[in-house]
Image (tube, rainbow, N blue to C red):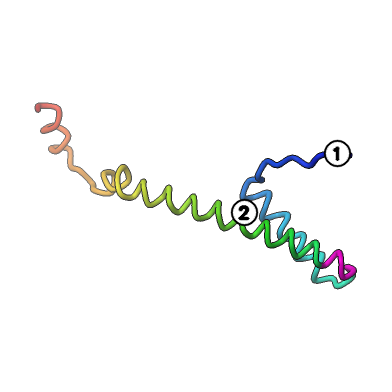
């Protein structure tokens, strides 16, 4: 019996699989057991996608609090000259 890899899929892979699960369920040709399994898998995939999005949002917050704010201002050429002379 093959063991399924426990590696968490990327956001894109999880989203594509979630879309397929939803499409399969919408067709309405799944048995009750298959529908329950699909629903469980869909819930797992949704959790993965939400987690990945939350991680990305946190990374953006960190960047906005530091590095990106420094680039938001538009320093003039004289500002660069001042820094070089200091």
Image: 84 above or below 70: above
Name the residue at 80% across, 62% down. 37
The image quadrant that residue 29 belongs to is bottom right
For the C terminus, the quadrant is top left
Disc 1 to disc 2: CB gap under 8 Å: no
Nearest the viewer among 77 and 20 is 20
* Horizontal relation, residue 50 to residue 42: left or right: left
Asked which secondary structure carries label 1, the reply is: loop
Q: Is residue 69 left or right of residue 78?
A: right
In the shown orientation, is residue 27 left or right of residue 12?
right
Residue at (75%, 65%) from the top-left corner?
Answer: 39
Residue 5 in the image, given as x and y percentages of width and height? 74, 40
Q: Which residue is mark 2?
A: 48
Furthest residue in direction top, as rendered: 85
Q: Nearer the viewer, mark 1 or mark 2?
A: 1
The residues colored magenta run 30-35
Q: Left or right of 78: which side holds 64?
A: right
Q: Position of residue 47 (x, y in %)?
A: 61, 58
Instruction: Kindly identify which residue carries mark 1.
Output: 2
Q: Nearer the viewer, residue 84 or 76?
A: 84
Task: Assess whether residue 42 is covered by the magenta stretch.
Answer: no
């Amino acid at each position: 019996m093959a063991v399924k890899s426990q590696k968490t899929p990327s956001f894109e892979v999880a989203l594509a699989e979630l879309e397929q699960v939803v499409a399969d369920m919408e067709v309405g040709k799944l048995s009750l057991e298959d529908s329950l399994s699909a629903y469980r898998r869909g819930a797992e995939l949704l959790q993965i996608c939400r987690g990945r999005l939350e991680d990305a949002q946190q990374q953006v917050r960190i960047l906005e609090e530091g590095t990106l704010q420094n680039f938001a201002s538009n320093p003039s050429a004289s500002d660069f000259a001042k820094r070089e002379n200091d």
